[in-house]
Image (tube, rainbow, N blue to C red):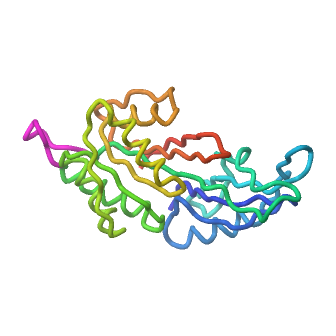
Amino acid sequence: MSGLVIVEAVIGRDGTVRDVRVVKPLPFGVDQAAADAVKQWKFSPGTRNGEPVDVFGVLTLQFKSDGSMVRGGEMAVQGGVLGGVGGPQQQRAPLTTVILVRHAEKGATPASDPPLTSQGLQRAESLARMFANTPISAIYTTPYARTRQTAAPLAAAKRLTPIEVEAGRSYPQDIVRRVNEQRGGTFVVVGHSDTTRDVLRAFGFVEAKDIPDSEYDNLYIVTYGPLTEMRVLSLKY
């Protein structure tokens, strides 16, 4: 068992970590081990106007097959300041997480709307397992069978009805608008090679590259908040 674990946490003004929540888990108890490990970390506290303040961050841990964990890079530590010194009771600035994938492997026929292959159906199940312990606010697909089938196992596990969005010219902006209307949650967007790229760009990741037609295993996690700049984590699944 190996892979990446992503957690949200508050880094206190004394540099200690609290309020840990696993965003992208791994099975077999790795979640709890990751949360316990993060709680032992010590940071230099964030500051505002020269004074230490609480900071909300997204942290990564790489779990290795030998059971060890390696701390990864911070995706959004520097931005999310919680309240001010001497101000009102501090509250966590809402962090929005958007998980984007292209549909899984598709068949050749019918050319207008091919379904997933057996390999694609297996990948769809893998996506559901990957986020089995992650609260999901909404799942977006296009009207095509291959995106709906890719989302189906995760939607069933979360008891959610995927929202179909037409993959027209305004699709990237429609996705961004829908997510921002419910900001603060975790959203899954299952699209196509071109729409996934375009949505990444619409969220502000202008460097998003074309996805080759032969690649089905790319997974992108976008995080941002009112006090946190947008970050993108690119993974394979």
- The residue lying furthest to the front in this view is 88
Q: Is residue 183 left or right of residue 119?
A: right
Question: Is 121 drawn above or below residue 192 in the view shown?
Answer: below
Q: Viewed as shown, does residue 196 lie left or right of 41?
A: left
Where residue 103 sits: x, y (%)? 29, 45
Q: Majority secondary structure of the magenta segment?
A: loop
Q: Position of residue 56 (x, y in %)?
A: 70, 55
* Foreground residue among 42 and 224: 224
Decide which of 157, 30 is in the foreground and name it: 157
- 50 to 199, vertically: above or below: below
- Tell me if residue 1 comes above or below residue 190 in the rendering: below
Front position in the image: 105 or 231: 231
Specify the segment rendered in magenta: 104-115
Residue at 10% over, 36% down: 111
Q: Give the answer, above or below, for where 164 lies relative to 176.
A: below
Q: Residue at x 31, y 42 (%)?
A: 191
